Image (tube, rainbow, N blue to C red):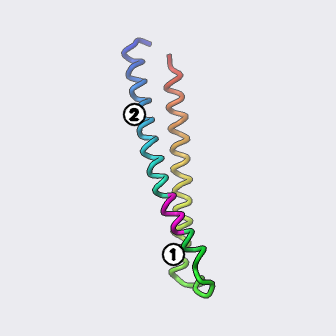
Amino acid sequence: MNKERLKKIADIAELLDNAKSSIEALRDEINDLQEIEQDILDNYPENMQDGARYERTDLANDELLEAMEGVDNIVDSLDDLIGTLQRIE
């Protein structure tokens, strides 16, 4: 492979790494929201835990956890992709 194409591959890997960093920052924001929801759930009065509001908060917490898992999968995939590109000589 010539230097020009190798440079292009290196540039793509760098762009993917930058995207990964941005996605990780978004994951941190999702995590912050999930921690808030979990704290609310943990401090909910027991006699109100059967209410609709509690159920919405619980569902939101579950969905945020699922979103973080999805983001983690994306980051793992980007790591694999970046590694593959970096192995090209």
Residue under the image location 53 percent in, 39 percent down? 77
Residue denoted by label 1: 56
Q: Residue at x 36, y 15 (%)?
A: 4
Secondary element at tag 2 = helix
Q: Judge whether residue 13 is colored magenta.
A: no
If the image is split into quadrants, where does the N terminus sit? top left
Would you name the residue on which mark 2 appears? 15
Residue 74, percent from left and from top: 51, 45
The local crowd at label 1, few if under 14, some if 14 to 19, many if 20 or more residues have their Cα within 10 Å, is few
Q: Is residue 28 above or below residue 37?
A: above
* Disc on the earlier residue, 1 or 2: 2
Determine if the magenta segment contains residue 34: yes
User: As drawn, is 7 to the left or to the right of 80?
Assistant: left
Residue 14: which numbered mark, if any? none
Q: Is residue 73 above or below residue 11?
A: below
Task: For label 2, count other residues whose C-alpha is less than 10 Å away and answer few (under 14), some (14-19) or many (20+).
Answer: few
Expressed as whole percent of the image width and height from the top left, the position of residue 52 reads 52, 82
Vertical side of 77 occupied by 37: above or below: below
Of residue 2 and residue 28, the one placed in the foreground of this image is: 28
Q: Main secondary structure of the magenta part?
A: helix
- Magenta stretch? 31-37
Q: Residue at 56% of width from left, 53% of height from top?
A: 69
Q: Residue furthest top?
A: 2
Q: What residue appears at the point 56 percent right and 72 percent down from the top-left corner?
A: 58
Q: Amino acid at mark 1?
A: Arg
Q: Circle 1 — which element?
A: helix
